[in-house]
Image (spheres, rainbow, N blue to C red):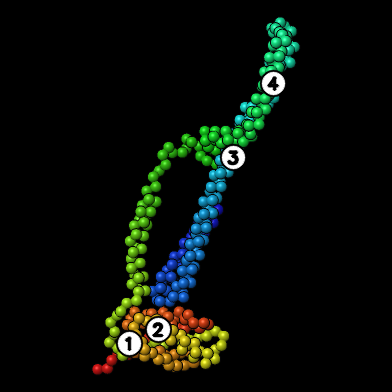
Amino acid sequence: MKALRLVGYTFGGLSAVYAGYYTVLYLTRWEWQRALISAALLIVVEVFLATVLLLTRLTRLEARLEQSDARVEEVRKRLELTRDPVPNHFNWLRSSDLTDVNGSRTFVFVPVLMVAGAALSGLAMVLQKVAGATARPGAERRLAGRLAVLTAPPTTGTASLEDQTAVPPARTGRRAIAVVAAVAGLVLVPVLWSALADATQTRAEEAPDAVSTTMVFRVETRGDQSPEAVQLAAQDLWETCRRSTAAENGDATLNRMDADVYTGVVRPALPSHDMMRLRGCIEDANTNRTSAVVLGEGQVAQRG
């Protein structure tokens, strides 16, 4: 069981790291569809880890409850052993006393005493009935539950008390690892947050010393692969992605080089951050049944 939990934690932890890494990577590349898929996978893995952790805690709690119930049942059985197997509520009416003829007892039969005895017997019977009705079987179980904390712990499968140390050894290694992990997390989280915010923010940049930006990409469609369908998918993808940049690119043309290879030209040239956004949008290919791969990119420098 422990090995299975270890495998589950290892698999879930590696999957979470893998999904988190690609979520950040796709965000920095401006590939939003892939980032959403990776983030959804990360949430699924986190739910899986939380479920495994809850099931482990519930299993431990159930085991503790079963041990407690077993100890309570053992104490209740011991209480039953102390009970008289044949209860005799009126010891003064035992037949052994009535048949004693050695003269050690004096039998007094006075009508007044007989009436008083009958009245007391009736009162005792009423008290007995009331006590039997109010004292339910759960009273002994509650008493056993209170006494269970005073019993010795079970010794089956455990070492003897003489072999156990009075004070457990201090786990300095685990504490040091926990402190180092906490400090590393406090330092790493702001750094990653700042890097991610810097990579995904929209900001104005200086225009490069170039005339235009050129990007060559291949378009593939699923289903209808006719030249007209590919041309329409490429044009739709280009018009969608060229508007995702922060810089103005009113002069953006698309030219066909081969059956499925196209060249997009933007004038004036785009800054480096906008080129990354354009490339990420094209490779993300969020149009229907279309995928694209960037084959190359560059800028045409100004003459003289």
Hey, which quadrant is residue 253 in on the image? Answer: bottom left
Secondary structure of the residue carrying tag 1 is: loop
Hey, which quadrant is residue 295 in on the image? Answer: bottom left
Neighbour class for label 4 at 10 Å: few (<14), some, many (≥20)? Answer: few
x, y percentage for residue 192?
35, 67
Instruction: Kindly identify which residue carries mark 1.
Output: 269
Whole-number angstrom distance, CA of label 2 to CA of label 3: 71 Å
Whole-number angstrom distance, CA of label 2 to CA of label 1: 14 Å
Instruction: Kindly identify which residue carries mark 4.
Output: 122
Q: Earlier in the sequence, mark 2 or mark 3?
A: 3
Residue type at mark 1 is: Ala
Mark 3 or 1: the one toward you: 1
Q: Is residue 167 visible?
A: yes
Whole-number angstrom distance, CA of label 1 to CA of label 4: 112 Å
Instruction: Kindly identify which residue carries mark 2.
Output: 243
Above or below — where is 96 with respect to 212?
above
Whole-number angstrom distance, CA of label 4 to CA of label 3: 41 Å
Hey, which quadrant is residue 32 in on the image? Answer: bottom left
Mark 2 or 3: the one toward you: 2
- Residue plotted at (67% across, 27% down): 129
Instruction: Kindly identify which residue carries mark 3.
Output: 70
Mark 1 or 4: the one toward you: 4
Q: Earlier in the sequence, mark 1 or mark 4?
A: 4
Residue type at mark 2 is: Arg
Whole-number angstrom distance, CA of label 4 to CA of label 2: 101 Å
